[in-house]
Image (cartoon, rainbow, N blue to C red):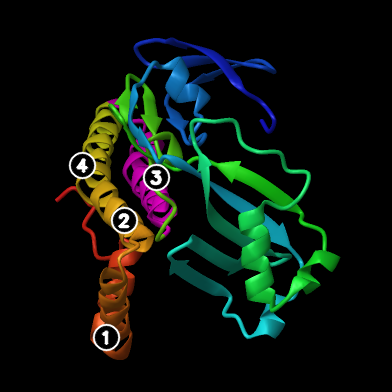
């Protein structure tokens, strides 16, 4: 049911009744994969503790052909003035920049490109040529480090951003959400197909325990460290980080190990 919100829930011993903006839905299990502002997490009253980074970031999109500026499809810059990422999507370039705007204040208006974005695009495009292309997205967002108090509340199971939020630096929020989805489906699917209520209970309990442990013990520390590294202003610390990355890129085994760790393919989330 697209464009449908959850307004309330009624839990039973073997099912849940969801009240939505369109109708009521009865389900054996509810998977809350409805993002950072999860209605389901709120309806089931699951706490979402953690903290928010002090400044806003900004994401924008443009069809300006940055590929003609000899830029890779995925490019990152960090420097004394902040961070910039540039990612080629099928129909546009997506640019994310850090700003000095306080996260505690309402975001600035989006009538014109933010000065930080304007400076970044001028530098990347080699001049103001990008201004002949409309900015198709201009959206501020807050970055968080948060984990749900539990990934399972009765017959609700949380996954992805509804369960855990991290800094976007490094992409581990997306990667860990994909791991959540695959592992939960792998555990719960066969038990549902067999109609085995006890196996379903074991699958959900094990998923919730394993993935919350991974979020707290692996994803949160790694993303905090990555954000701190790219935000570092000290020249020596920045040079040392770049030297480490160059050394890893030059060594095929180290490069593969780095990529496996960044994508969480080196992590055991099987529950063993």
Q: Nearer the viewer, residue 26 or 178?
A: 178
* Residue highlighted by disc 4: 213
Dot in front, 4 or 1: 1
Q: Nearer the viewer, mark 3 or mark 4?
A: 4
Q: Earlier in the sequence, mark 1 or mark 2?
A: 2
Q: CA distance from mark 2 to mark 3?
A: 34 Å
Query: Residue 219 location, x and y as percent?
Result: 28, 50
N-term mark: 3 or 1: 3
The residue under label 1 is: 247
Tell me the CA gap for discs 3 and 1.
Answer: 38 Å
Residue indicated by mark 3: 185
In the rendered structure, the answer to whether residue 180 lies left or right of residue 128 reads left
Q: Quadrant of residue 13?
A: top left
Magenta residues (range): 171-197
Q: Residues within 10 Å of mark 2 (few under 14, many from 20)?
A: few
Whether residue 126 appears in this view of the structure is yes
Where residue 105 appears, as percent x and y from the top left, is 54, 31
Give above or below for 166 relative to 262: above
Q: Secondary structure at mark 4?
A: helix
Q: Residue at x 23, y 42 (%)?
A: 216
Mark pair 4, 1: CA separation:
31 Å
Q: Residues within 10 Å of mark 3 (few under 14, many from 20)?
A: some
> Is 114 colored magenta in this rendering?
no
In the rendered image of this protein, does residue 145 appear above or below residue 47? below
Q: CA distance from mark 3 to mark 4?
A: 18 Å
Nearest to the observer: residue 165 or residue 117 = 117
Residue 228: which numbered mark, if any?
A: 2
The chief SS type of the magenta part is helix
Disc on the earlier residue, 2 or 3: 3
Q: Residues within 10 Å of mark 1 (few under 14, many from 20)?
A: few
Dot 4 alpha-carbon crowd within 10 angstroms: few under 14, some 14 to 19, many 20 or more:
few
């Amino acid at each position: 049911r697209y464009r449908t919100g959850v307004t309330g829930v009624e839990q039973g011993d073997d099912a849940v009744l969801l009240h939505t903006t369109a109708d009521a839905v009865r389900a054996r299990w509810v998977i809350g994969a409805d993002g950072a502002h999860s209605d389901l997490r709120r309806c089931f009253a699951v706490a979402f503790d953690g903290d928010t980074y002090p400044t806003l970031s900004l994401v924008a999109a443009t069809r300006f052909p940055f590929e003609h500026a000899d830029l890779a499809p995925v490019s990152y810059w960090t420097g004394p003035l902040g961070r910039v990422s540039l990612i080629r999507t099928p129909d546009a370039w997506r640019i994310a920049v850090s700003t000095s705007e306080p996260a505690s204040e309402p975001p600035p208006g989006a009538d014109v490109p933010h000065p930080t974005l304007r400076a970044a695009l001028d530098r990347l495009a080699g001049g103001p040529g990008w201004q002949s292309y409309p900015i198709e997205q201009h959206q501020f967002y807050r970055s968080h480090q948060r984990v749900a108090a539990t990934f399972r509340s009765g017959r609700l199971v949380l996954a992805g951003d509804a369960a855990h939020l991290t800094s976007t630096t490094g992409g581990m929020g997306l990667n860990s959400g994909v791991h959540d989805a695959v592992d939960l489906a792998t555990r719960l699917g066969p038990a549902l197909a067999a109609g085995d209520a006890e196996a379903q209970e074991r699958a959900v309990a094990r998923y919730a325990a394993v993935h919350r442990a991974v979020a707290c013990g692996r994803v949160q520390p790694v993303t905090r460290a990555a954000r701190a590294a790219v935000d570092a202003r000290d020249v020596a610390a920045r040079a040392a980080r770049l030297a480490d990355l160059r050394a890893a890129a030059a060594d095929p085994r180290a490069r593969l190990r780095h990529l496996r760790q960044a994508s969480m393919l080196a992590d055991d989330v099987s529950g063993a």
